[in-house]
Image (spheres, rainbow, N blue to C red):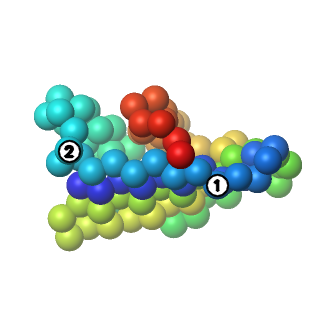
């Protein structure tokens, strides 16, 4: 499975990306991220999740997951991240350096 998380916006407006190939992860980590993807119902999420109001200097996340014949890309404003997606984004951010 291939995972890409792009974080853009913020105070400096800089875009940074994390890319993960789960085939290169230890089996335990690959299983953990799979559980988080399943728990988030990631492949059922809409393409865009907007915030109620535009807020300056906030991040926007674009998360893409490719798994066998399934692929989904979700773009979400930082203040609109659904509770079921937060653990997945936090896992990616804490297990890989952004750069």
Where, by quadrant of the figure, is residue 84 drawn? top left
Q: Is residue 39 left or right of residue 77?
A: left
Q: Is residue 12 left or right of residue 43?
A: right
Mark 2 or mark 1: which comes first in sequence?
A: 1
Q: Position of residue 53 (x, y in %)?
A: 82, 53
Q: Position of residue 81 (x, y in %)?
A: 59, 44
Q: Residues within 10 Å of mark 1 (few under 14, many from 20)?
A: some
Q: Position of residue 80 (x, y in %)?
A: 65, 46
| Relative vertical location of residue 66 with respect to residue 57 in this rendering, above or below | below
Q: Is residue 20 left or right of residue 93?
A: left
Give the alpha-carbon distance from disc 2 to disc 1, as whole Å: 24 Å
Q: Is residue 9 left or right of residue 24?
A: right
Residue found 46% across the figure and 48% down from its top: 18
Residue found 32% across the figure and 66% down from its top: 71
Q: Residue furthest right?
A: 56
Q: Position of residue 99 (x, y in %)?
A: 53, 46
* Residue for badge 1: 15
Q: Secondary structure at mark 2?
A: helix
Q: Residues within 10 Å of mark 2 (few under 14, many from 20)?
A: few
Q: Is residue 91 visible?
A: no
Where, by quadrant of the figure, is residue 70 drawn? bottom left
The image's mark for residue 24 is 2
Residue found 45% across the figure and 64% down from its top: 73
Residue found 24% across the figure and 55% down from its top: 1
| Relative vertical location of residue 86 with respect to residue 9 in this rendering, above or below | above
Q: Residue furthest bottom?
A: 69
């Amino acid at each position: 499975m291939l995972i890409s998380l792009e974080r853009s916006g913020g105070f400096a407006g800089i875009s940074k990306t994390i890319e993960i190939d789960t085939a290169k992860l230890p089996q335990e980590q690959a299983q953990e991220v799979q559980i988080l993807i399943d728990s988030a119902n990631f492949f059922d999420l809409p393409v865009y999740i907007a915030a109620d109001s535009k807020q300056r200097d906030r991040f926007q996340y674009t998360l893409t997951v490719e798994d066998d014949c399934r692929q989904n890309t979700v773009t979400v404003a930082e203040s609109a991240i659904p509770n079921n997606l937060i653990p997945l984004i936090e896992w990616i951010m804490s297990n890989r350096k952004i750069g």
